[in-house]
Image (tube, rainbow, N blue to C red):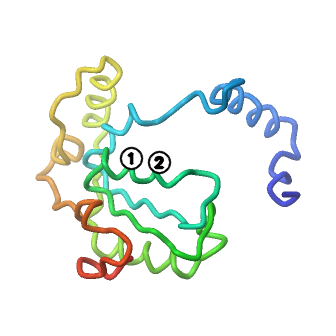
């Protein structure tokens, strides 16, 4: 815990942390959810890796994400907790390397993102694909989350 708190040593860091905490937490707990922004990810390659032993975020959150972002590559890491990069870095690295090797990156287009974000703010989401965001033909998606569950090594070798 002390190591994590070192990042809050400066006055500006503490103030930024407290401001952020106040913005997303109220007396009932977490008051902000990202689910309404998930439409922005529809053409962005996404890897979601979580630890099976995570006691901070319930598994139904990860499963809900998989349902809302069906092209995301979902990876469950059996020996990891809330911070897979700390509790199972080797297994996470294998998943990240496999994802990067099998994924066509999205090429950034300022105009495409401006259009998407503007439409998203007004809740009039147009059909957007990678071609809109990158200004070129859409790359092939990596796969569906439902195809990438733990134990399914047939698609890309990642479980």
Quadrant containing the C terminus in the rendered view: bottom left
Which residue is at the front of the view, 104 or 33?
A: 33
Q: Position of residue 62 (x, y in %)?
A: 44, 53
Position of residue 67 in the picture relative to residue 17 (left or right): left
Determine the secondary structure under disc 1. helix
Determine the residue positioned at 72% across, 24% down: 27
Most foreground residue, 137 or 110: 137
The location of residue 28, given as percent across then percent down, is 67, 26
Residue toward you, 106 or 29: 29
Closer-to-camera residue (43/147): 147
Secondary element at image label 2:
helix
List the single residue furthest toward the top: 122
* Residue marked by disc 1: 64
Is 17 positioned to the left or the right of 84 in the image?
right
Q: Which residue is mark 2?
A: 61
Residue drawn at 36 percent across, 39 percent down = 38
Residue 156 located left or right of residue 11: left
Q: Position of residue 29 (x, y in %)?
A: 66, 31
In the rendered view, would you say 28 is above or below 48?
A: above
- The residue lying at 60 percent from left, 66 percent from top is 53
Q: Residue 121's quadrant in the figure?
A: top left
Mark 1 near mark 2, Cβ–Cβ under 8 Å? yes
């Amino acid at each position: 815990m002390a190591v994590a708190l070192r990042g809050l040593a400066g006055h500006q860091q503490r103030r930024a942390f407290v401001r952020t905490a106040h913005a997303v937490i109220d007396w009932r707990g977490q008051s902000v959810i990202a689910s309404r922004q998930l439409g922005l990810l529809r053409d962005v390659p996404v890897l979601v890796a979580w630890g099976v032993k995570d006691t901070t975020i319930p598994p139904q959150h990860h499963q809900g994400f998989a349902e809302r972002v069906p092209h995301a590559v979902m990876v469950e890491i059996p020996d990891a907790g809330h911070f897979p990069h700390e509790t199972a870095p080797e297994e996470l690295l294998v998943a990240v390397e496999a994802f990067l090797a099998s994924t066509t990156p999205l090429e950034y287009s300022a105009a495409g993102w401006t259009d998407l974000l503007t439409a998203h703010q007004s809740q009039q989401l147009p059909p957007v694909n990678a071609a809109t965001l990158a200004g070129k033909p859409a790359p092939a998606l990596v796969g569906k989350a439902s195809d990438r569950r733990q134990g399914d090594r047939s698609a890309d070798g990642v479980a």
